[in-house]
Amino acid sequence: MHRPTSFGSEKDMPIWISDRLILAFPADAEYIKADPRAIILEAGQAFGTGTHPTTQMCLREIEAQLVAGDHVLDVGTGSGILAIAAARLGAGKVVAIDVNPHACRVARANVGHNSLDRVVTVAAGTPDILGRAEGFHLVLANLDSAGGAKSWLPILSRLCRTGGKIILSGFQPPGEGAVVAALGGANLRRLDRRAQGSWITFLLEKQP
Ligand SMILES: C[S@@+](CC[C@H](N)C(=O)[O-])C[C@H]1O[C@@H](n2cnc3c(N)ncnc32)[C@H](O)[C@@H]1O
């Protein structure tokens, strides 16, 4: 079995992300599917094969931040990859949403491939559909642009409990300043910044 040490393209699947996560296609060998670290994924036309820098940075940050039993919100779930990873890593409950109904269908199928239907719920829409939802311990938001990230920050912050974390990605340096400028107004503090290629990921903490 080919075992790359870093992320490759989709043709390199299975991909060993870390000692705790492996990405595999449904058609991959049965012994991979039986591995509790395996995420079975068929992205189709949805974003989220595991090969994009933003997805990779988010996966690493989830591994670093997630505490077993955490309630997690994944905004812009695409293929469901981050939601499924969070569930594999021990989240107690994951709510995954995407504005694109096709992505939601793909994500639901992938949740099913991984037998995680009891942990992960997928819904179509933007974060405002969650209304007065509980405060999540961890919010994941790998959105399409700095503008998207910035404009949703206040709602993402409201959906996160005090002391909870937000992993925000999907933007590049030209838009980074606008995202940084919006943090204080959304009651968020930046704890860390990752970069891979020209892409950036922030780890944010909800302030009291
Ligand atoms: C860059 S992809 C990320 C997919 C996956 N989470 C990953 O990390 O690979 C962004 C996804 O966010 C969705 N999206 C963009 N803006 C959104 C919003 N305001 N609310 C919900 N979904 C959104 C898009 O439809 C797309 O599927």
Image (spheres, helix red, strand yellow):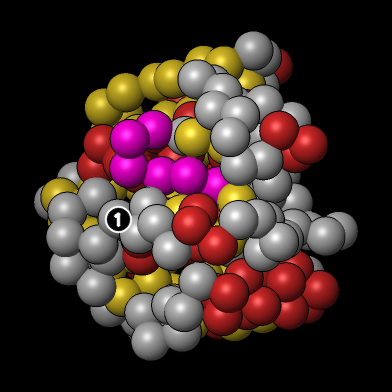
In the rendered image, the vertical position of residue 84 relative to residue 64, given as above or below:
below
- Residue located 33% across and 35% down the image: 19
In the rendered image, the vertical position of residue 159 relative to residue 197, given as above or below:
below
Q: Position of residue 208 (x, y in %)?
A: 13, 51
Q: Is residue 204 magenta?
A: no
Return the residue nearer the eye: 47 or 32: 32
In this orientation, does residue 148 appear? no
Q: Position of residue 57 (x, y in %)?
A: 49, 30
In the rendered image, the vertical position of residue 119 relative to residue 68, given as above or below:
below
Magenta span: chief secondary structure: loop
The amino acid marked with disc number 1 is Leu
- Residue located 72% across and 72% down the image: 106
How many numbered marks have been drawn onto this rendered protein structure?
1
Return the residue nearer the eye: 10 or 79: 10
Kindly state the secondary structure of the residue where label 1 is placed.
loop
- Residue located 26% across and 27% down the image: 191
Disc 1 CB within 8 Å of nearest ligand 1 atom: no
Give the image quarter of residue 85. Answer: bottom left
The part of the chain drawn in magenta is: 18-23
Q: Is residue 22 magenta?
A: yes
Left or right: 188 in relation to 18: left
Return the residue nearer the eye: 208 or 88: 88
Residue that lies at the very extreme toward the right in this rendered image? 45
Residue that lies at the very extreme toward the bottom in this rendered image? 118
Residue at numbered disc 1 = 89
Give the quarter of the figure containing the N terminus. top right
- Residue located 55% across and 62% down the image: 30
Q: Residues within 10 Å of mark 1 (few under 14, many from 20)?
A: many
Q: Position of residue 66 (x, y in %)?
A: 24, 50
In this orientation, does residue 21 appear? yes
Q: Position of residue 122 (x, y in %)?
A: 56, 79
